[in-house]
Amino acid sequence: MRTSDYTSAMINELQRTLELLSEESVEQLVERIARAQKVFVAGAGRSGLMMRAFAMRLMHMGFAVYVVGETVTPGLGPDDLLIIGSGSGETKSLAVMAAKAKGIGASLAAATTNPESTIGQISDVVIQVLASPKEASDQESFTIQPMGSLFEQSLLLVFDSIILRMMDRQELDGSAMFGRHANLE
Ligand SMILES: O=C([C@H](O)CO)[C@H](O)[C@H](O)COP(=O)(O)O
């Protein structure tokens, strides 16, 4: 196959996965983001990179948002929201973090392939992304991609769609957001 054939196959996979997203869960997450005092995002590896990309856009929108693990990230409080991106929903450090957030009384949201996972089960909002977790993709016929690639790409698109939805609600445009972009880069 040529590279462009792979690209087409990946776009088809993404379309199929994203068409199956629950609009209701997405709306629930939008509401929780709007109500939260501070928003925290977390994820490991490539899933974590997608969560960082989402955090940047939330910052551009004017939200108080932090990436868990950064030196300047403050403590989580009961009025805050933690959003975890985890394909498996079982990554140990994230499962411990999720349980701690619940103990503090914060809201917990997860984007995962598996709502029945450790993290999915204790989350207030679960966005189920119908893609393979990293350990299963080779056995699944619905993706040609290795490990969690389809999940990770879907995360980026799901969260970028959520940003567009929230921009619409707040009547914000890209130029207002650009005004908040880093000017020391
Ligand atoms: O980096 C990852 C790997 O490349 C999968 O394709 C994962 O995102 C990382 O290992 C975290 O796993 P999950 O929590 O299951 O997303």
Image (cartoon, grey):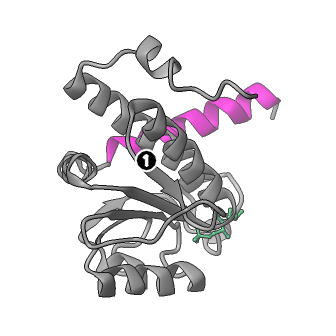
Q: Is residue 35 above or below residue 162?
A: below
From the image, tell me which residue sits under label 1.
17
Please state if 135 lies on the left or on the right of 55 as rendered: right
Residue found 19% across the figure and 53% down from its top: 28
Q: Is residue 92 above or below residue 67?
A: below
Q: Secondary structure at mark 1?
A: helix
Q: Would you say residue 68 sits in the magenta stretch?
A: no
Q: Position of residue 100 (x, y in %)?
A: 41, 85
Please state which amino acid type lies under the numbered disc 1.
Thr
Tell me if I can see residue 145 in this picture. yes
| Foreground residue among 154 and 81 | 81
Residue found 72% across the figure and 36% down from its top: 6
Tell me the magenta residue range: 3-20
Q: Is residue 126 above or below residue 97?
A: above
**Where is the C terminus found, in terms of image quarters?**
top right
| Residue extending furthest toward the right | 2
Residue found 31% across the figure and 83% down from its top: 104
